[in-house]
Amino acid sequence: MGRIERLVYGAEQRGAQTDVPDGLREISAYEASYNAIVTAKMADRQAYKDFNERCEQLFSNPTFAHSVLEKYRLTAYAKRQSPPASLAAQTPPAQTPPQRALSPLTIRRPLSANDEWIYPRAFPLLLLCLLPIAFCTWAALQLTGSGHQVLPTRPPVPGGLPALPESLRVVSVPGVRYAVYVLSGIVLEKEENERLYSFSSTTPAQTLHMGGGHYQYTPAQTSTYTESVREQIIWVRSPEGREQSWTLYNSDLRLRPGQLISALVRPLPKDTGDILMIYNHTTGTVDKCRAMEKAHGNQGFIRREIVQWTANLACGVAAAIVTFLYLPLLGGGGIYPPFAIWWVFGSLVLITLSFLIVTPWMTRRTLKRRDAAFDREYLPGLRQFFEQGTPILQRAFGRA
């Protein structure tokens, strides 16, 4: 006990230099020294456990408690407990000590190994956090839709279909808004090719300060993705006699030369466009193209990264809240090391579940919701428009 007494004496001398009421100064200095010892013992788990057991024995010994309080003239701040018989005649009546406000973030007692092992106790609550994470993912999907800017459209060609009705010229589904126009022609020829695309992404290395002089290093990681794309090129002649090509990607559309077709096009920058839907005037059928997923989805590396990093941020906040319910944030003059360790563990669990389950699920639900809105609000009107335009194209190409 000589070491603890020396620490108490040194803490008392340091506390004498602060502007704190008598008695509270000694208590504050004693607690600071005790926390310093606890932090030093954390480096060795067995030593930390032995130190806690020894402290519990001493703290439960009233003789030791009263002897230390008497030695440093702190008996007036003793807890409400009966002193041992040998000291009862010497100890003055105990008084209720003034309570010193402690931050709820600060460690107040040495935590045992069972206290620090918060999982699997906290695991059900951690899984419950997937609900607000799903909401954050949904909000990010609404803000990063592929189409928000209404671009100008091409005017109708002479002899072809007229311009779309006002109610069909701009498609507005949840989180997405874009303009559309119509192209028409007669099929001349069709080609099919297959292309292979590869792209990669790299996450930077990170160093996380765990407290107590400990650091966790995460190396940089590079992921490479390969995608096979089936390209279908349709050569058509427009009503004014010009030949042009329409390119579809990963489409199962079946066409024959001589058939009359119309395409619903979403304009893109640089005078390009995506074909969203093909109407075959010869057979009276409608086929959606894969570009519809691009228009109603969140295509592009940057958009996908924004959605996932929004979910990652929500995972980190949720893990911090859950960990704080079981462990203090601060201890020993810095971040309490077990708090940082379990916060990182909880964040990794949530991020993994978000990446594998929550984000893909919310992405599919968002796409289905937008497709359903398009089918409900615009597809019937577009089909009626194409059906009424079939005689116009038949006369233009001499098929009446």
Image (tube, rainbow, N blue to C red):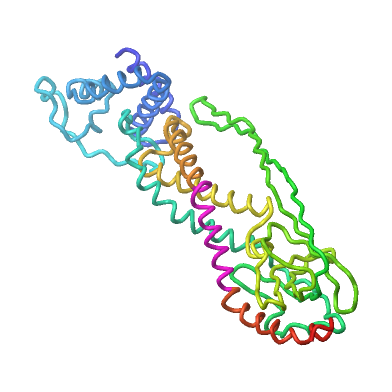
Q: Is residue 17 above or below residue 328?
A: above
Kindly identify the residue that appears in the image at 37 percent across and 38 percent down: 327
Magenta span includes 147: no
Picture quadrant where residue 287 is located: bottom right
Q: Quadrant of the N terminus?
A: top left
**Coordinates of residue 105 in the picture (x, y in percent):** 41, 41
Q: Is residue 368 above or below residue 240?
A: above
Q: In the displayed orientation, state which residue is furthest to the right.
A: 241
Magenta span includes 363: yes
133 vs 318, nearest the viewer: 133
**Coordinates of residue 354 in the picture (x, y in percent):** 50, 48
Q: In the displayed orientation, state which residue is furthest to the left.
A: 85
Q: Is residue 136 left or right of residue 99?
A: right
Question: Which secondary structure type mostly characterizes the magenta part of the structure?
Answer: helix
What is the number of callouts on the image?
0
Q: Is residue 20 above or below residue 292?
A: above
Kindly identify the residue that appears in the image at 44 percent across and 40 percent down: 346
Kindly identify the residue that appears in the image at 58 percent across and 31 percent down: 218
266 vs 320, nearest the viewer: 266
Q: Is residue 168 left or right of residue 323?
A: right
Q: Which stretch did the figure color magenta?
A: 354-373
**Coordinates of residue 337 in the picture (x, y in percent):** 45, 31
274 vs 309, nearest the viewer: 274
Q: Is residue 56 left or right of residue 169?
A: left
Q: In the displayed orientation, state which residue is furthest to the top.
A: 2
Q: Quadrant of the C terminus?
A: bottom right
267 vs 114, nearest the viewer: 267
Picture quadrant where residue 60 is located: top left
**Coordinates of residue 184 in the picture (x, y in percent):** 79, 76
Picture quadrant where residue 63 is located: top left
Q: Is residue 179 left or right of residue 53?
A: right
